Amino acid sequence: MVELVASALIPAMLMYTRDFASRFGEQTETVIYEFANVLEEAGITPEQFRRGIARFKDRAGLQPWTVNPAEFVELCKPQPEDVGLPSRENAFKEFCRHGRWPADHKWSHAAVYVAGQRVGHFALTHTNERDSIARFNKRYDEVVKAIRDGANFDDEVPTPAQAPNESRRAKPERVSADCAKLREQLRRAK
């Protein structure tokens, strides 16, 4: 891992960040060993390392600062998008928008619904955003890992046929008819 860090990560940091040379110029060897140790402890493979380098370069346009070893490990880890799932952010937004009436929505993936259900729609929409996102991401990561390991959650997603009472939305024509009926009853009562 030391060779990979020295040959790929350090040159990328020198090229893509504004602060690496000024922060670590004379301590490059120490930085190499620290990154290598943290990556090995996290079990990062060479393929994951290359994915991390690519993500590091992608983010450098918006965040041109050196990452610490823990941040780089996160860049190396598999992301939901790597297996065709929505990003954490998109999954969170989708569940918050549609989790209250899950049978009325065609979910982008069963993982979104299952992760949200494991936290609960009320818990996600009635706590502060930072805690909600952290709780959802934890459950979503668990579900994504299970899917990568071969799990299938398609049977857990409700459909209108499975949950006929799930949707409590009134049909507009029914509301109009009920209102007309009540108006008539009130008019007669006078």
Image (tube, grey):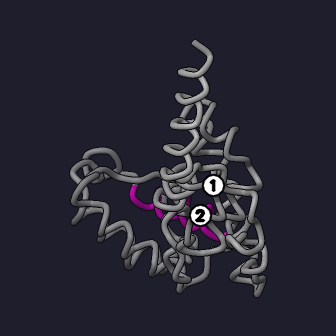
Determine whether the residue tagged by mark 2 lies in a helix, strand or loop: helix
Q: Does the segment drawn in magenta span residue 24?
A: no
Please give the residue where the numbered disc 2 appears in the rendered image.
104
In this view, the residue farthest toward the top is 190
Q: In the rendering, at what x and y percent does residue 60 appear?
A: 27, 60
Q: Which mark is residue 101?
A: 1
Residue placed at 57% from the left, 70% from the top? 107
Q: Position of residue 164 (x, y in %)?
A: 74, 65
The quarter of the displayed image where residue 138 is located: bottom right
Residue 113 in the image: above or below residue 46:
above
Would you say the residues marked 1 and 2 are in contact, meaning their CB atoms lie under 8 Å apart? yes
Query: Quick one: quadrant of the N terminus?
Result: bottom right
Q: Amino acid at mark 1?
A: Trp
Is the stretch drawn in magenta largely helix, strand or loop?
helix
Magenta range is 28-40
Q: Is residue 19 left or right of residue 139?
A: left
Q: Secondary structure at mark 1?
A: loop
Nearest the viewer among 36 and 64 is: 64
Measuring 76% from the left and 83% from the top, which residue is drawn there?
152
Three-letter residue code for mark 2: Asp
- How many neighbours does mark 1 have within 10 angstroms: few (below 14), some (14-19), or many (20 or more)? some
Quarter of the rendering occupied by the C terminus: top right
